[in-house]
Image: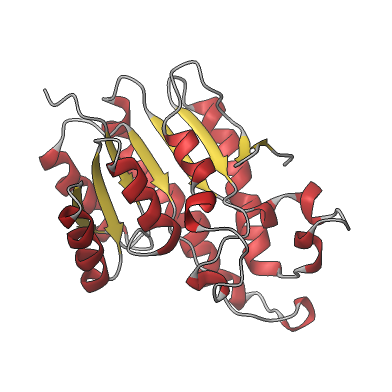
Amino acid sequence: MNATTTALVTGANKGLGRETVRRLGELGWQIFLGARDADRGKQAAAELVEQGLNVEFVPLDVTSVDSIAAAVATVGERTSRLDVLINNAGILGPIRTPEETQAEDFRAVFETNVFGSVQVTHAFLPLLRAAEHPRIVMVSSGMGSLTITSDPDRLESTLLSLTYTSSKSALNMITSQYARALPGILVNAADPGYTATDFNNHAGYQTLLEGTDAIVHLATLTPDGPTGGYFDRSGRIPW
């Protein structure tokens, strides 16, 4: 049996996802780079393979049950288990003030940020349970913290969005519930912090390396590591 640690990262053709793939690949892991855009996914994987990393592109649209099932089949053909699942795929959604936001604006955001993470996690549970020390990392945001967004001294309190923030709060609760419901699997949420990516038009003050610190830390936890927690690159943060 292949002893190499295996991991799947969703939404990984660019930004935090791609950097996470690169960093975990440099550890000698076998990484499945999941992405909805086939051309960008293949290109990202090819560039990382050129760097000597064991990376394979897997078509994966987290909003499609059929696409997820196909991804499970593909990964299952390459490995007998999945050690780490990183639910990174996410979208910002429409940029509207709270008073302009309508119920319809939530649908696409929750479809990707919440339902997608649940669908992917559910589908990959058999492969995760086949691992000796499985870990799940939900890529959340400080914008999903009720405590942080209520703190006037924090930047997050000045950024108003009904859709994105609530989707990440929902993901946080899902993380907490999974952690208690899945004994033997470490399930945690990561807040990358305000990182310069396409997501924010590169306005963030952190580098991609800094932005992936919490994700990589949670992906590489030892068996006695925490579960049901919420962490940024400096440590545990409040829900």
* Image: 168 above or below 138: below
Q: Residue furthest top?
A: 224
Q: Looking at the image, how many numbered discs can be counted on the residues?
A: 0
Q: Position of residue 143 (x, y in %)?
A: 69, 57
Position of the N terminus, as image quadrant, is top left
Position of the C terminus, as image quadrant, is top right
What residue is at 39 percent from the left and 54 percent from the top?
A: 19
Q: Position of residue 193 (x, y in %)?
A: 62, 54
* Figure quadrant of residue 152: bottom right
* Image: 7 above or below 35: above
The foreground one among 173 and 220 is 220
Q: Position of residue 236 (x, y in %)?
A: 67, 34
What residue is at 25 percent from the left and 63 percent from the top?
A: 44
The foreground one among 140 and 50 is 50
* Figure quadrant of residue 106: bottom right
| Residue 221 shown left or right of residue 234 in the figure | left
| Residue 141 shown left or right of residue 224 in the figure | right
| Residue 88 shown left or right of residue 35 in the figure | right
Can residue 70 be seen at all in this image of the molecule?
A: no
What residue is at 35 percent from the left and 36 percent from the top?
A: 84
Q: Residue furthest right?
A: 152
In this picture the colour scheme is secondary structure
Can residue 154 be seen at all in this image of the molecule?
A: yes
| Residue 113 shown left or right of residue 231 in the figure | left
The foreground one among 94 and 159 is 159
Q: Position of residue 126 (x, y in %)?
A: 28, 32
